[in-house]
Amino acid sequence: MIDVAIQQRLGDFGLDCRFTAPSGVTAIFGPSGSGKTSVINAVAGLGTPDTGRIAIGDRVLFDSTTGTNLPTQKRRVGYVFQDARLFPHMTVQDNLRYGGRHDEASVIKVLGLQDLLSRAPATLSGGEKQRVALGRALMCDPQILLMDEPLAALDAPRKAEILPYLERLRDSVQIPILYVSHDVSEVARLATTLVVLADGKTAISGPVEAVLSDPAHVPLLGTRAAGAVISARIAGRLLDDGLTELSFSGGRLLMPGMLGKIGQTVRLRIPAQDVILAQEAPKGLSALNILPVTITKISAGRGPGVAVGLQAGNDTLLARVTRRSAARMELQVGTQLYAIIKATAVGQKDIGSEHHTPPPPAL
């Protein structure tokens, strides 16, 4: 468990961040300049809050009321930056060992570094460099792992390459991970808890599924970021069509690609802007996914859009429609509708492995 409650004045900018999160990945999300990096720098000891408290479990890193302020080298933090910052004159293995010698074999296995150990950083791809940087951070046996937009400098193929390793890491360690990002697809795939910052203040904090799918949060998240996160089981494949059939509490979904093994659980994000509502079960559409839903919440912002919360089985979906459409359809809480989701609306970057409670520490 990590507990953060800090205030700090940085020139004209004021930081006031408060959240409590369990082990797992806590994503700190918000636009540029909202204070995300300042928060994890305070946890690392690279910045000193004016007032407040930072604790990991029963270990206090900073407390302004008692004068506690552990130096960085005693905080047991692993830090992964946007750029890998590897030593160019060292091999991959030497870079790893610079961080320490904690359970070297397990770190190498979890991050798939076996074939890279003798190589020089200059010969690695961007994704490989970040995996090595992550391994080096883990080798110091940290009590918390801090990641500051580690995929921001990578192109889409390199992000796709490294995300499965981050998912594997999430499920292999029992330490808190603070993950700074402005990419909602990364957040939805990796995080268990989401903290949203706005103008230096904690605007929202809670389980990622609840935060992203709440209609009331759309103005803060942005219309492109809002959307449901659901867990589904791989139920079958349509090999001729290149589709995977997923089963969840609200019904069945067809998604493009071969997403995993039959019976495996995956997590997928369904953007609100890609969900269409219909009063009757439509016929003759190209869309493959049509689900019966019930409206649970409606939130109208300042613009022309309306966010609509939907119950599908035991899961929550989110749709965004215009005010005109909401009025014409007479949408209200309790109305039963059909949600239409194009199979191609959910990209590969929005589908990842489901979070599993870690077994006893593997690292």
Image (cartoon, rainbow, N blue to C red):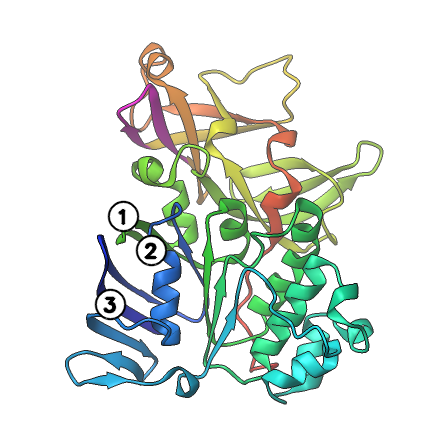
> Where does label 2 land, which residue?
35
Q: Residue at x 56, y 82 (%)?
A: 361
Circle 3: residue type? Ala
Q: Nearer the viewer, mark 3 or mark 2?
A: 2
Q: Eyeballing the image, is 359 above or below 255?
A: below
Q: Quadrant of residue 42?
A: bottom left
Q: Which residues are the magenta region?
A: 297-310
Circle 1: residue type? Asp
> Where does label 3 land, which residue?
5
Q: Residue at x 60, y 69 (%)?
A: 85
Disc nearer the start of the sequence (3/2): 3
Relative horizontal placement of residue 157, taking residue 194 as reference (left or right): right
> Where does label 1 land, which residue?
199
Q: Which residue in the rendered view is the most extreme toward the left?
A: 65
Label 2 vs label 1: CA separation?
7 Å
Label 3 vs label 2: CA separation?
14 Å
How far across and how far down the image is residue 210, in percent?
38, 48
Q: Residue at x 66, y 80 (%)?
A: 96
Circle 2: residue type? Gly
Label 3 secondary element: strand
How far across and how far down the image is residue 163, in percent?
63, 57
Mark 3 is surrounded, within 10 Å at the Cα level, by few (under 14), some (14 to 19) or many (20 or more) other residues, namely: some
